[in-house]
Image: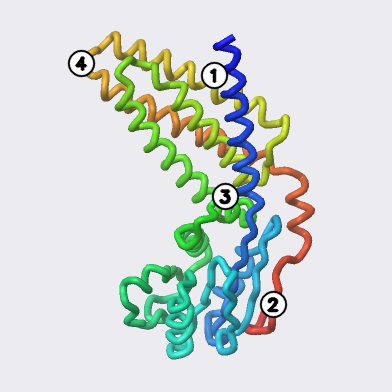
Amino acid sequence: MAKKKIDVERLRGVVNMGREAEESMAESMIISVHVDPACPRWLALAVKAALVPERDAVVNVSSLVSYPTAADVDVNVIVAGHSEEDVRSAIRTLAAKRQRVVVVAESSLDIPETNLPTKLSQFVFDVVASENGPFRERFSAALLDATDKDVSCAANFAFCREAATARLVSRVAARNVFMGLADFIPGAGMPLITMNQINMGFDIAASYGHGLTIGRVPEVIFIVAAGFAYRGIAKMLCQAIPPFGIVIRIGVAYGGTLVTGRTLATHFSQDLPPAQEEVASRPKIVSTPVVGEA
């Protein structure tokens, strides 16, 4: 009976993890984009193309010279050009309200000195790029730095998914290293490590728009099977070379989590839910004319 009760508790825990990931995916997200009319046209269009929500996020776009401020905005994006005073004023105003600001520019010369105190400068993130490829990579990193809604951000904006899942996998891998260190009996900590990986799997699925459905069962089975494999590898190597037991446990906990996470990310990136394609076709961008848009 005790074993059955434990299994039921673990199953309930797995289901709760899935629900929490689904709730993170469904979190509301509002982004305000403030465009300097003097910014490079390609940069304005690059921001516009990147911030097309595939779920329920809302993107408000306005001119920098008449930008509105709202308390419920998650991230402000300033597309900077040569209007130095307007850009500086917007950054200082938004940071003073403790609102997170991502400033994107073609050149670092277009990002003015704001002389903000440290307690306010932590709300400002810069992105400098002269072409679209590097811009998307740097913009995704800054957007994720500026929000605590990683899963919602990735579920809404496709260009953020790779960076978001990479960060998620790295965090869980680092957490599992500590469990590997505390694992005095080789392999005994693998159930906890595996549960962390299941939680990670649900978050990765949610980042790609997949909720808690029966379709998650094969992925949970894969994670559990991988956990048994990692436990077997750890035991075998620790018995073969006992002096390196700690290093082996750390390596298996870290490396196994990376392999599992990257495998799941690849799987979900190739299996996007059809609903996202339908949502993507519906405009979620509220815009006022700012720069010569195509």
Say if 281 sits above or below 37 in the image.
above
Name the residue located 45 percent from the left edge and 87 percent from the top edge: 89
Q: Name the residue under label 1.
A: 225
Distance between the alpha carbons at the discs numbered 4 and 3: 41 Å
Name the residue located 42 percent from the left edge and 68 percent from the top edge: 125
Q: Mark 2 points at which residue?
A: 287
- Image quadrant occupied by the N terminus: top right
Say if 41 sits above or below 82 in the image.
above
Q: Mark 3 points at which residue?
A: 151
Q: Mark 4 points at which residue?
A: 243
| Type of the residue with mark 4 | Pro
Distance between the alpha carbons at the discs numbered 4 and 1: 27 Å
Distance between the alpha carbons at the discs numbered 1 and 3: 25 Å
Secondary structure beneath disc 1?
Answer: helix
Name the residue located 51 percent from the left edge and 49 percent from the top edge: 164
Give the mark nearest the N terminus, 4 or 1: 1
Q: Position of residue 36 (x, y in %)?
A: 54, 84
| Type of the residue with mark 3 | Val
